[in-house]
């Protein structure tokens, strides 16, 4: 498949498309200087140039393409199909995870701050419902460095990957976008600065509290805050994925789970 800088233009590069489990088609291609200039200039969508091989008309009179040959896609500013997106992404991913039954430092606000909560602990499976929503396309989660506009990565583009870990916790993989927030995050991690990725829990989340610890039974969030920290408090900072694989091959120390607290279910903000 060719990637064009304009409709019916010259092929800038070639790429091999892939299809995700949810049906989303992704096209990854080298970001040549011309492609970078086009995307920076506002061409952040794609237009599919196709030849229909099989089609039909629905009862409502809509043309439905059943099979098609797609030799090229073009970068455009005004797409006919708004579901498309084009972006620049930096190479190299960073990963971390949130373990279960492990007390972690929490710089909490809202309800938790009012309850004098200083630490949180996630129950096994507390992320499962949210992961199903993300996989089905019902929820997009963004990794942000400050506010909602400072996007480092997001699940919609595949630059943020969330998965269930073996202990029922949350695995986080970030491939920073070529944004100011993304570049800054990459530079900090590569410079050896401890950068944590922490979910910003919404008031739909459920938890039980005992003393200064909140045990999360259902985690619901749309943002993951990615920030440098001077205290890790039970969570591993983001690290290069390749380095992590080497460390796993050598073996990692086990973590002694804490006892679950007892108290009343409440609503919270983190």
Image: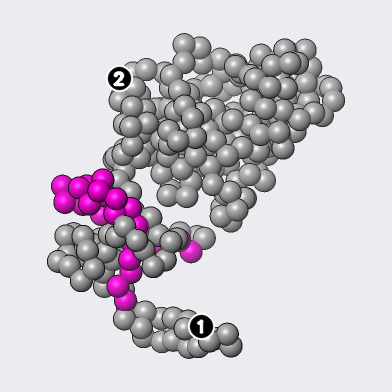
Q: In this rendering, is residue 184 above or below 218?
A: above
**Range of the magenta residues?**
23-50
Q: Report x, y in % for residue 39.
A: 27, 50
| Label of residue 191 in the image | 2
Residue displayed at 75% across by 33% down: 206
Q: Report x, y in % for residue 25.
A: 41, 62
Q: Which tag is nearer the camera, tag 2 or tag 1?
A: 1
Q: Quadrant of the N terminus?
A: bottom left
For residue 14, say whether it is visible: no
Q: Which residue is mark 1?
A: 62
| Label of residue 156 in the image | none
Circle 2 sits in a helix, a strand or a loop, which is it? loop
Residue displayed at 73% across by 22% down: 111
Cα separation between marks 2 and 1 = 54 Å
Q: In this rendering, is residue 142 above or below 263?
A: below
In front of the other: 38 or 121: 38
The image quarter containing residue 234 is top right
Residue displayed at 71% across by 20% down: 112
Circle 1 sits in a helix, a strand or a loop, which is it? loop
């Amino acid at each position: 498949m060719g990637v064009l800088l304009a409709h019916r233009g010259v092929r800038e590069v070639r790429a091999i498309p892939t299809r995700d489990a949810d049906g989303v088609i992704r096209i990854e291609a080298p970001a040549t200087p011309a492609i970078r200039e086009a995307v920076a200039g506002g061409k952040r969508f794609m237009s599919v140039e196709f030849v229909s091989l099989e089609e039909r008309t629905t009862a409502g009179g809509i043309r439905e393409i059943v099979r098609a040959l797609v030799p090229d896609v073009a970068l455009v500013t005004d797409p006919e199909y708004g579901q498309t997106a084009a972006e620049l992404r930096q190479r190299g991913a960073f990963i971390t995870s949130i373990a279960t039954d492990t007390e972690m430092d929490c710089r909490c606000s809202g309800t938790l701050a009012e309850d004098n909560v200083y630490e949180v602990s996630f129950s096994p499976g507390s992320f499962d419902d949210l992961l199903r929503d993300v996989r089905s396309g019902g929820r997009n989660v963004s990794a942000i460095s400050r506010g909602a506009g400072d996007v480092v990565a997001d699940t919609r583009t595949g630059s943020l990957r969330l998965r269930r870990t073996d202990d029922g916790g949350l695995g986080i993989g970030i491939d920073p976008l070529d944004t100011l927030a993304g570049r800054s995050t990459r530079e900090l991690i590569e410079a050896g600065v401890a950068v944590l990725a922490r979910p910003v829990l919404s008031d739909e989340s459920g938890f039980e509290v005992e003393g200064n610890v909140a045990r999360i039974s259902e985690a619901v969030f749309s943002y993951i805050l990615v920030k440098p920290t001077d205290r890790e408090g039970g969570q591993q900072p983001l690290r290069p994925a390749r380095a992590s694989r080497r460390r796993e091959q050598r073996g990692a120390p086990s973590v002694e789970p804490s006892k679950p607290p007892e108290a009343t279910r409440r609503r919270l903000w983190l």
